[in-house]
Amino acid sequence: MQPRILLIRLSSLGDIILTMPLIAALRQKYPEARIDLIVKKEFVKLAQFFPGLTLVIGLDTKKDILAKKVEELSATGYTHVLDLHNNFRSTKLHTIKDATVTIINKRSFKRWLLVKFKINLLKKEPDVIGRYFETAAGLGVSDTGSAPLFDISLKKKNGVAAICPGAKHWNKRWPVEHFQEAAKSLLTLGYRIEFHGSADERALADEIATALPIGSFKNKCGEVELHELPEIFAEIELAI
């Protein structure tokens, strides 16, 4: 009997993308299985690019009532629920009836020690993808070291280097002057520069671009929808 699997990873963008190797491994082992992923609604169109998924489910955190969503999910008859997020919303969502539920071990205390006190006890711990695979160990899949891969053919290269300078938190973001030096180096190698990100990151890209010659770059922050980026990046030479 093929399992019916629900993966829960509501956010953030990078963590959602890192579910792709696990999805691919589950699909390879269970070719006829139902494999669904639930994410926040703003990530649905992007996640629909992920090979191997049966369905992408969107959660509107401002409008959806979690108890009602649990009822809807329970009606699907999932046999396995993998909570790859482990926050208060995912904890409510994985109360699905009659499903075997496994919850990611996020090593939260060790992460806290690293961020707050620079004490690194994570050196021998698995990375995010490895932690996802730990959660799915009962389904007989293991991490082979594969990277996320969109099922999109690479197109003719266009000589563009993309710079995506934004991050949700300021202390996860490379400093402006470092982006400026990298961009200058790319220009000397013959690349044209495109900045990509949200509308909120447009000012950041403008600040970086003050160090670049006029006409050597395009600021596309806020002009491209998230789900359009895989196709655009299939043409780009490299991205930072």
Image (cartoon, rainbow, N blue to C red):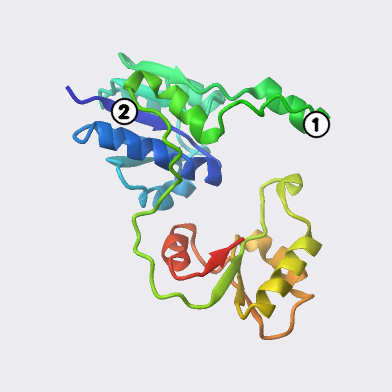
Q: Is 76 above or below relative to 195? A: above
Location of residue 53 in the rendering, given as x and y in whole percent from the top left corner: 31, 41
User: Dot 1: what SS?
Assistant: loop
Identified by mark 2, the residue type is Ile
Q: Is residue 49 left or right of residue 203?
A: left
Location of residue 4 in the rendering, given as x and y in whole percent from the top left corner: 26, 27
Check the picture and name the quadrant holding the N terminus.
top left
Label 1: few (<14), some (14–19) or many (≥20) C-alpha neighbours in 10 Å: few
Identified by mark 1, the residue type is Lys
Q: Can see residue 197?
A: yes
Q: Is 198 above or below relative to 33? A: below
**At 66% across and 27% down in the image, what residue appears?**
122
Check the picture and name the quadrant holding the C terminus.
bottom right
**At 70% across and 23% down in the image, what residue appears?**
110
User: Dot 2: what SS?
Assistant: strand
Location of residue 35 in the rendering, given as x and y in whole percent from the top left corner: 30, 34
Q: Is residue 202 left or right of residue 127?
A: right
Location of residue 157 in the rendering, given as x and y in whole percent from the top left corner: 45, 75
In the picture, the disc for residue 5 is 2
Mark 1 or mark 2: which comes first in sequence?
A: 2
Cα distance in 3D space between marks 1 and 2: 37 Å
Q: Can see residue 203?
A: no
Q: Quadrant of residue 231?
A: bottom left
Badge 1 is on which residue?
Answer: 118
For marks 1 and 2, give the one nearer the viewer: 1
Q: Is residue 160 left or right of residue 112?
A: left
